[in-house]
Image (cartoon, rainbow, N blue to C red):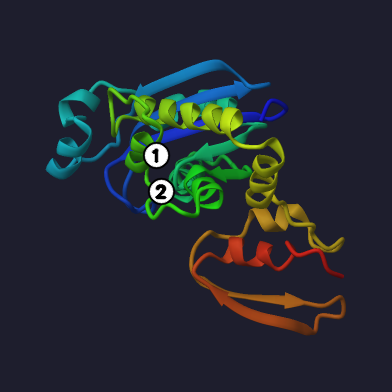
Amino acid sequence: MDTLNLSIVDIETTGISPAFDRIIEIAVLRISEGQLVEEYSTLVDPERTISYHIEALTGITNKDVHKAPFFRDIKDEVFRLLDGSIFVAHNARFDYGFLRREFDREGIAFSAKCLCTARLSRLLFPGYRRHNLDSIIERFGFTCENRHRALGDASVLWDFLRTLHQQIDETELTRAWTKILKAPTLPPLLKESTIRTLPESPGVYIFYGQGGGTLYVGKSVNIRQRVLSHFQNDRA
């Protein structure tokens, strides 16, 4: 961890669908060489009504976000905080999917390696049944004064990573990080720019050979992730 640049992210949203819902709060903790070097947190105007359920869960009301910045107002600062870092979040696909969608709306191509702390917990502590954030807080005795608020939850993840660094054998921890972060090695004729255009949504994909012949047809609920999975094994 001491050699990696990390951006620990937590967001609160109007719902669970990146296609229809929007971010109402975001926090980013920028970690460099094992040290917290920047802390950023802001409410965001979602340009739609926050439901009573979300207000009750987060404590964030429609009145709170009325004068908050729109995502387009903070996009450059958020991109700067994430750029060049490993994207760290609990159930990272959720936070990452929302931010990719927000950046897409602004015409910004964003991608990053993701470290999911829920998955990390499952790898390192297989004897535990639950790995949600409340369970991790209870397991390690962390304090979170503002649960279900972006900065409070992001701070718990930073506590979690530091605790792992102190309590888990370095070899075991490195093995777990490597397994989650393992990057695919793309074939020489498959450009990274092509991969970046693949949607993280359901559909069918086809691999073609050099001569144009069909090599493989597949389907997935997440095309980009499934395509990349073909190149993650150490094989010819």
At x 63%, y 31%, the residue is: 83
Q: How many marks?
A: 2
**Residue 136, quarter of picture:** top left
- Name which residue type carries label 2: His
For label 1, the SS is helix
Left or right: where 108 falls relative to 91: right
At x 28%, y 25%, the residue is: 146
Q: Nearer the viewer, residue 127 or 152?
A: 127
- Name which residue type carries label 1: Ile
Callout 1–callout 2 Cβ contact below 8 Å: yes
Residue 76 appears in view: yes
Q: Which mark is residue 46?
A: none
Q: Nearer the viewer, residue 89 or 131?
A: 131
Up-down relation of residue 194 to residue 78 (above or below): below
User: Could you give the CA–CA distance between mark 1 and mark 2, rounded to whole angstroms?
Assistant: 6 Å
Residue linked to disc 2: 131
Up-down relation of residue 209 to residue 155 (above or below): below
Q: Nearer the viewer, residue 10 or 174?
A: 174
Up-down relation of residue 193 to residue 233 (above or below): above
Residue 183: image x %, image y %?
Answer: 72, 51
- The N terminus, quarter of image: top right
Residue linked to disc 1: 136
